[in-house]
């Protein structure tokens, strides 16, 4: 869609994000019941991750700024690169109980999406995206002051994950 929009010549800013911290909230059942979460991505691979509230702030800033023109991608990288293993440590601190990360196979990951009712092509597309992330897809943009957003994973855990788990009790 971005390419189609760009072909019109319209002034365009396309926000590009890596992983969302908020996707962890989709795993509250596993975190609550098993004190673990899963991904096919290597647990020690440090990748950018941003909070959706920071994405919204960047979007609002661009929407309210009428001085720009042309077309450009705008990276939203979060404050640091972080691994799933480190996320598990931070979640453990925030929740006061040990949470661990478990790497799964790509086949098991895809199968899980199909168990949730996703079609084979959609499940394969999501799996392919995760495979690409595991091999550096999200590491192609250099971090700058402009594309670094403030919400740390610990702050996100305190503000979003802990209350979400409290509500799910």
Image (spheres, grey):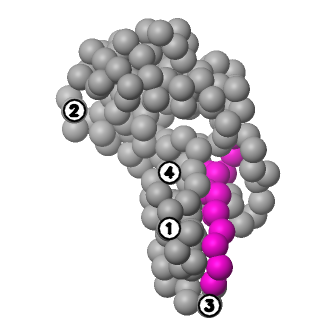
Horizontal side of 76 relative to 159 (left or right) equals right
Upstream in sequence: badge 3 or badge 2: 3
Mark 1 closeness class: few <14, some 14–19, many ≥20 residues within 10 Å:
few
Callout 1: SS: helix
What is the number of the mark on residue 5?
1
- Label 4 sits on residue: 51
Residue depth check, mark 1 versus mark 4: number of the one nearer the observer: 1
Give the alpha-carbon distance from disc 1 to disc 2, as whole Å.
41 Å
On the rendered structure, is 100 left or right of 48? left
Viewed as shown, does residue 32 lie left or right of 146? Answer: left
Give the crowd class for mark 2: few <14, some 14-19, many >=20 residues within 10 Å.
Answer: few
Disc 3 + disc 1, Cβ < 8 Å: no
Per the model, the C-alpha gap separating discs 3 and 2 is 45 Å
Q: Earlier in the sequence, mark 3 or mark 4?
A: 4
The mark closer to the camera, 4 or 2, is: 4
Picture quadrant of residue 165 = top left
Residue at mark 2: 168
Front-most of residues 24 and 11: 11
The picture places residue 12, in percent across and down from the top left corner, at 56, 73
């Amino acid at each position: 869609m971005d390419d189609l929009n760009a072909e019109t010549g319209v002034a365009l800013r396309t926000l590009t994000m890596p992983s969302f911290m908020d996707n962890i909230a989709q795993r509250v059942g596993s975190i609550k019941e098993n004190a673990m979460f899963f991904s096919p991505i290597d647990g020690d691979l440090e990748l950018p991750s941003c909070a959706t509230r920071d994405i919204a702030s960047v979007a609002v800033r661009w929407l309210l700024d009428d001085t720009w023109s042309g077309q450009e991608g705008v990276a939203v990288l979060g404050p640091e690169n972080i691994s799933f293993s480190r996320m598990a440590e931070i979640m453990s601190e925030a929740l006061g109980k040990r949470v661990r990360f478990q790497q799964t196979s790509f086949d098991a990951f895809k199968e899980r999406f199909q168990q949730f009712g996703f079609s084979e092509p959609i499940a394969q597309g999501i799996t392919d995206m995760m495979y690409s992330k595991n091999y550096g897809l999200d590491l192609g943009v250099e971090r700058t002051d402009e594309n670094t957003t403030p919400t740390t994973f610990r702050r996100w855990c305190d503000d979003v994950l802990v209350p979400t788990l409290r509500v799910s009790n």
